[in-house]
Image: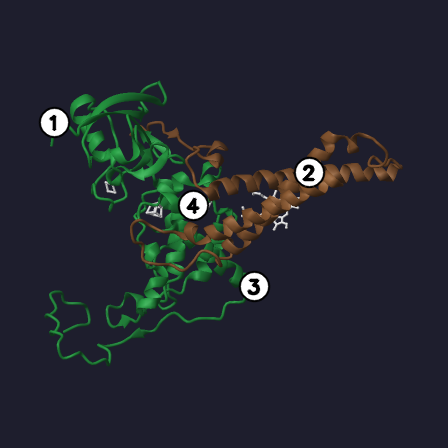
Chain colours: A green, B brown
């Protein structure tokens, strides 16, 4: 994918390096990268690995802003390497480092385990008292488009950790659950199928929980998916305060509709195709 | 299996300040913390100074240190810090109770976030703080 047209420019990448087996600690290495318009930071790193230094290590997978693997600090700001164009953020120089507030395994690779453990701790799945209802494949839960909108934005999170790296509270408090897990808590709390808010309140309202957030707003500013974690967290605080004051009117989670429902199919809609998978309980 | 050493990349207190390329709310946050601690310090000093009264010592009468220009300037700074802290604090109460952050919406690039929703409130409150600080300066000068 090498090009040699006039639009090529040389940008010096200043990459933060770290080898655990070496004795040097962290250091910065500079690489001159020929850059064309539209080229991403991820492509720049590939150029370095292919042509200049094969020992450079980072993590990526989808190279299109979906998997959340390539979060790194680009010119002082947590970003996805794959959705950041070099010429949008750099003149002649570009600083690339691993995400702050995580432990670094090697070069640009952060260990995200601490974040995922906190994510699991807020039970990021639909909780209902009736287990059978959840596990049976029969029937469906009704949810209106308006109800979907209450949590859809927060469901777009790709767990890249950029928000955790930008958060000033995370910078000094390793126990703080952080914007990503707390946004996930709000995503499920706001889901009309869910009945687990009171249970999650024990986590989200704990001393390591959402009241550690001071609305610096950095998480929302850096989030590459527009999830707006700062919004989710303030809505979470609101519900915690209302719950503590017993001011929220009790709402039952939405019911499960058994069978195929009683709605009528519009005349111009084709019939559903035959089942390709046999579910248990179906003949 | 050997477990290799990890390098901590936690920013520490410097992380509160950010790298200088952050938004308005980040600066409001750090100033809120500094002014909060400053007026707390003043409160403690205030308690110490007034407690001398028990011993019959009235430090604020006469022409002592408490009436020197340096101290009067200091008092003015405490007032300015309080004006900022109170105005920004009211914004934070509204924002953190989820009142001024807007509803969840489908994200469309370029993303607009809750920061954009509460920004007019921030600007209004800063304006109010400025007016209070200016009124304080006026009172200090003629008083
Ligand atoms: C009208 C009066 C006041 C209002 C509306 C107010 C509001 C607030 C709010 C909402 C917070 C939490 C902000 C956050 O979530 O980060 C806060 C924090 C704080 N306030 Fe105040 N406050 C007022 C007066 C005071 C006074 C008189 C003092 C000192 C004696 C003070 C000291 C502090 C301190 C030390 C913090 C913690 C700062 C931090 O953690 O960053 N405040 N204030
Ligand atoms: S909220 Fe945004 S920045 Fe944070 S992990 Fe999810 S996608 Fe990444
Ligand atoms: S708004 Fe809250 S969670 Fe987001 S970066 Fe600021 S302190 Fe962290
Ligand atoms: S490589 Fe998947 S998000 Fe960047």
Asked whether residue B37 appears in the rendered view, the answer is yes
* Residue B72 placement (x, y as % from top left): 73, 35
The residue that appears at 69% across and 42% down in the rendered structure is B138
Q: What's the distance in space between the residues labelled 3 and 2, CA to CA?
A: 39 Å
Where is the N terminus of chain B found, in terms of image quarters? top left
Please give the residue where the numbered disc 3 appears in the rendered image: A245
Label 3: how many residues lie within 10 Å, few (<14), some (14-19) or many (20+)?
A: few
Which quadrant of the structure image shows residue B93? bottom right
The chain to which mark 2 is attached is B
**Ligand 4 quadrant in view:** top left
> B115 left or right of A271?
right
Q: Residue A274 versus residue A224: which sits nearer the camera?
A: A224
Please give the residue where the numbered disc 1 appears in the rendered image: A4
* Residue A218 placement (x, y as % from top left): 42, 43
The residue that appears at 40% across and 45% down in the rendered structure is A219
Q: What's the distance in space between the residues labelled 4 and 1, CA to CA?
A: 45 Å
> CB of residue at label 4: within 8 Å of ligand 3?
yes
Q: Are marks 3 and 4 on the same chain?
A: yes
Please give the residue where the numbered disc 2 appears in the rendered image: B76
Instruction: State whether residue B38 is above or below residue B99.
Output: above
Whether the residues at callouts 4 and 2 have beta carbons within 8 Å, the answer is no
Instruction: State whether residue A116 is above or below residue A205.
Output: above
Whether the residues at callouts 2 and 1 have beta carbons within 8 Å, the answer is no
Instruction: Tell me the SS state at disc 1.
Output: loop
Q: Which numbered disc covers residue A178?
A: 4
Instruction: Tell me the SS state at disc 2.
Output: helix
Whether the residues at callouts 3 and 2 have beta carbons within 8 Å, the answer is no
* Residue A208 placement (x, y as % from top left): 49, 46
């Amino acid at each position: 994918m090498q090009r040699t047209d006039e639009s090529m420019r040389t940008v010096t990448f200043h990459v933060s390096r770290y080898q655990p087996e070496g004795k040097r600690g962290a250091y910065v290495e500079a690489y001159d990268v020929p850059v064309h318009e539209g080229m991403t930071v991820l492509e720049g790193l590939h150029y370095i690995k292919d042509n200049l230094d094969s020992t450079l290590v980072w993590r990526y997978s989808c190279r299109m802003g979906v998997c959340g693997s390539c979060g790194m600090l680009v010119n002082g700001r947590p970003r996805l390497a794959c959705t950041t164009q070099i010429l949008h953020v750099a003149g002649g120089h570009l600083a690339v480092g691993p995400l702050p507030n995580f432990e670094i395994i090697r070069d640009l690779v952060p260990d995200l385990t601490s974040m995922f453990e906190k994510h699991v701790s807020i039970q990021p799945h639909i909780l209902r008292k009736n287990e059978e209802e959840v596990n049976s494949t029969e029937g469906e839960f009704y949810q209106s488009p308006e109800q979907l909108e209450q949590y859809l934005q927060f469901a777009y999170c790709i767990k890249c950790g950029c928000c955790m790296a930008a958060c000033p509270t995370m910078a000094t408090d390793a126990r703080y659950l952080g914007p990503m897990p707390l946004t996930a808590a709000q995503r499920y709390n706001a889901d009309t199928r869910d009945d687990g808010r009171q249970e999650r309140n024990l986590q989200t309202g704990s001393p390591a929980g959402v009241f550690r957030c001071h609305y610096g707003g950095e998480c929302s500013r850096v989030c590459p998916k527009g999830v707006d974690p700062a919004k989710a967290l303030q809505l979470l605080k609101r519900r915690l305060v209302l719950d503590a004051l017993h001011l929220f009117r009790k709402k039952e989670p939405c019911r499960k509709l058994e069978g195929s429902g009683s709605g009528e199919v519009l005349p111009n809609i084709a019939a559903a195709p035959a089942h390709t998978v046999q579910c248990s309980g179906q003949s | 299996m050997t477990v290799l050493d990890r390098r901590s990349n936690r920013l520490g207190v410097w992380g509160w300040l950010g790298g200088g390329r952050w938004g308005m709310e980040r600066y409001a946050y750090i100033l809120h913390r500094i002014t909060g601690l400053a007026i707390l310090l003043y409160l403690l000093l205030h308690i110490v100074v007034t407690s001398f009264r028990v011993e019959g010592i009235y430090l604020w009468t006469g022409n002592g240190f408490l009436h020197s220009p340096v101290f009067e300037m200091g008092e003015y700074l405490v007032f300015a810090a309080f004006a900022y802290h109170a105005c920004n604090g009211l914004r934070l109460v509204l924002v953190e109770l989820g009142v001024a952050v807007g509803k969840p919406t489908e994200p469309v690039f370029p993303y607009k976030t809750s920061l954009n929703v509460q920004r007019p409130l921030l600007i209004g409150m800063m304006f109010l703080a400025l007016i209070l600080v200016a009124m304080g300066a006026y009172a200090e000068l003629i008083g």
